[in-house]
Amino acid sequence: MKPVILTAALALATAAHAEAPIVMPYDGTFDDATFAVETAIVGQGLVIDYVSHVGEMLNRTGEDVGSDVMLFKEADIFIFCSAVVSREVMEADPMNIAHCPYGIFVAEDAEGAVTIGYRDYPDGPMEKVEALLAEIVKEATEN
């Protein structure tokens, strides 16, 4: 396959698997939600590699890119991996590396609604990752 055709095929395959994120409302403040998510991740024996402060970046750079739209008051993404689950899904298909690391976001929109969510993954082995993320989000939203 020629590189251009391969690139187009991969782009179409990726778009075909793109789904809306799984989002749960959170009854509390943004700070309470981030604490709950962090606690739930660590409670699974996982290590948070990085917290991406997407909301701060969007608010800081809006004017620079010619926008005055406030998307979020605050929004963070907790980035982490699971050695056990990652090994399992990558042994099933090494190209599942494309989905690692995993992320759970916490966002407070311009109206003050707080949500917690994560990306929807393709059917098959990646359903194990979704189950882990769903368990973490469930724990965070029930506390």
Image: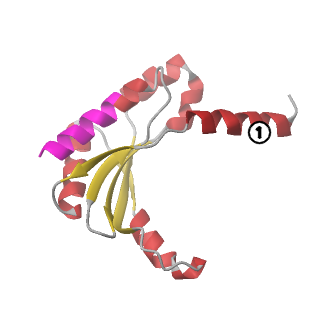
- Dividing the picture into quadrants, the one containing residue 8 is top right
In terms of secondary structure, where does tag 1 sit?
helix
Q: Horizontal placement of 101 versus 46: left or right?
A: right
Q: Measured from the top left, where is residue 3 in percent x and y? A: 84, 37
Q: Horizontal placement of 109 versus 38: left or right?
A: right
Q: Quadrant of the N terminus?
A: top right
Q: Measured from the top left, where is residue 95 in percent x and y? A: 59, 28
Reply yes or no: does residue 138 show up in magenta.
yes
Q: Please identify the residue farthest to the front as the structure is shown.
A: 111
Reply yes or no: does residue 32 show up in magenta.
no
- Dot 1, crowdedness within 10 Å: few (<14), some or many (≥20)? few
Please report the bounds of the magenta region as a residue range. Answer: 131-143
Relative to 59, residue 17 above or below: above
The residue under the point 33% across, 36% down is: 133
- Dividing the picture into quadrants, the one containing residue 71 is bottom left
> Disc 1 marks which residue?
7
Q: Horizontal placement of 29 versus 50: left or right?
A: left
Would residue 38 be visible to someone looking at this image? no
Q: Please identify the residue farthest to the top as the structure is shown.
A: 92
Q: Please identify the residue farthest to the right as the structure is shown.
A: 2
Residue flagged by tag 1: what amino acid is it?
Thr
Relative to 52, residue 14 above or below: above
Q: Please identify the residue farthest to the left as the structure is shown.
A: 143
Prevailing secondary structure class for the magenta stretch in the rendered image? helix
The residue under the point 54% across, 78% down is: 67
The residue under the point 66% across, 32% down is: 13
Q: Measured from the top left, where is residue 33 in percent x and y? A: 21, 55
Q: Horizontal placement of 10 versus 130: left or right?
A: right
Would residue 23 be visible to someone looking at this image? yes
